[in-house]
Image (cartoon, helix red, strand yellow):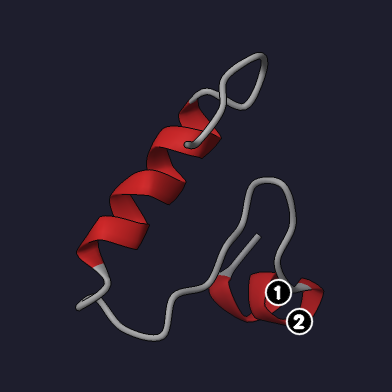
């Protein structure tokens, strides 16, 4: 799957879009939540 297809499909349990790379805290939290998807939580 390429970037264009991901954009067309939109966000999901494994894809989340950020407006800019300046949102580092949110990006790290999202990566952590995705990594802990089965049984983990992002708090």
As drawn, which residue projects farthest toward the front? 43
* Horizontal and vertical percent position of residue 17: 52, 72
Question: Is residue 23 positioned above or below 16 on the image?
Answer: below
Count numbered badges in the picture: 2
Compared to residue 37, the image places residue 17 above or below, namely below
Q: Is residue 10 left or right of residue 42?
A: right
Q: Quadrant of the N terminus?
A: bottom right
Mark 2: few, some, or many residues within 10 Å (few <14, many ≥20)? few
Q: Are marks 2 and 1 in contact (CB under 8 Å)?
A: yes
What is the quadrant of residue 32 in the picture? top left
* Residue at figure coordinates x 52%, y 23% from the top left: 36
Q: Position of residue 27 (x, y in %)?
A: 34, 58
Residue 29, numbered circle: none
Q: Give the side of residue 35 with respect to residue 11, left or right.
A: left
Q: Give the side of residue 26 with respect to residue 15, left or right.
A: left
Q: Is residue 18 above or below residue 16?
A: below
Spatial CA distance of label 2 from label 1 is: 5 Å
In the picture of the structure, the residue carrying the numbered disc 1 is: 5
* Secondary element type, mark 1: helix
Circle number at residue 8: 2
Judging depth in this view, the residue of 41 and 8 nearest the camera is 41
Give the x, y percent position of residue 9.
79, 72
Secondary structure, mark 2, is helix
């Amino acid at each position: 799957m390429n970037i264009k297809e991901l954009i067309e499909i939109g966000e999901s349990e494994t894809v989340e879009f950020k407006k800019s790379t300046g949102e580092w805290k949110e990006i790290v939290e999202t990566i952590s939540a995705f990594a802990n998807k089965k049984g983990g939580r992002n708090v």
